[in-house]
Image (cartoon, rainbow, N blue to C red):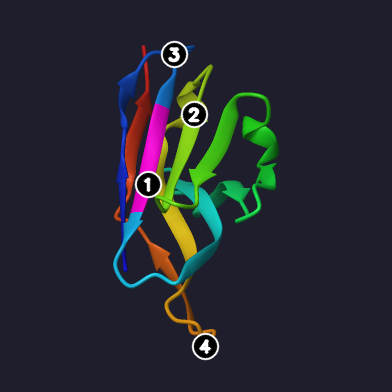
Amino acid sequence: VQLVESGGGLVQPGESLKLSCVASGTIFSINDMKWYRQAPGKPRELVAAVTNRGSTNYAESVKGRFTISRDNAKYTMDLQMNSLQPEDTAVYYCNADVLVDGLGSRWSYWGQGTQVTVSS
């Protein structure tokens, strides 16, 4: 299973970006999907999560600005980021809890990360 992120870039404060993550490979189903981020010198932190039923939760720092969504049929997940601030600068990682067969074999996979830089 591979996870590939896209959509990162350089934006000015107050602008928006949309990150996408697509999973491919031997997938039976995907449980939770999450976005994490890691800024230089800081630990990786959970930004947002979405269950396979669409329930979501967010870090306090992004509530009201970021929206996570997914398409179960396409194995994709998006993160719409609005009102970006310099403190949102980080490498953003996609994470998925994947069932690879019908017997319950379950693995956590990570994408390679995409850089988001917010600077004037």
**Residue 21 on the magenta segment:** yes
Which residue does the numbered mark 1 point to in the structure image? Answer: 21
**Disc 2 residue type (three-letter):** Gln
Going 45% across and 14% down the picture, which residue do you hit?
13
Which residue does the numbered mark 4 point to in the structure image? Answer: 103
> How far is disc 3 from disc 2 in space, using C-alphas?
11 Å
Tags 1 and 2 touching, CB below 8 Å = no
Per the image, label 4 sits on a secondary structure element best described as loop
- Mark with earlier residue (4, 1): 1
Which residue does the numbered mark 2 point to in the structure image? Answer: 80
Q: Which residues are magenta?
A: 18-22
Image quadrant containing the C terminus: top left
Q: Residues within 10 Å of mark 2 (few under 14, many from 20)?
A: some
Which residue does the numbered mark 3 point to in the structure image? Answer: 15
> How far is disc 4 from disc 1 in space, using C-alphas?
26 Å
**Residue 85 on the magenta segment:** no
Per the image, label 2 sits on a secondary structure element best described as strand
Q: Position of residue 87 (x, y in %)?
A: 50, 29
The answer to whether residue 40 is visible is no
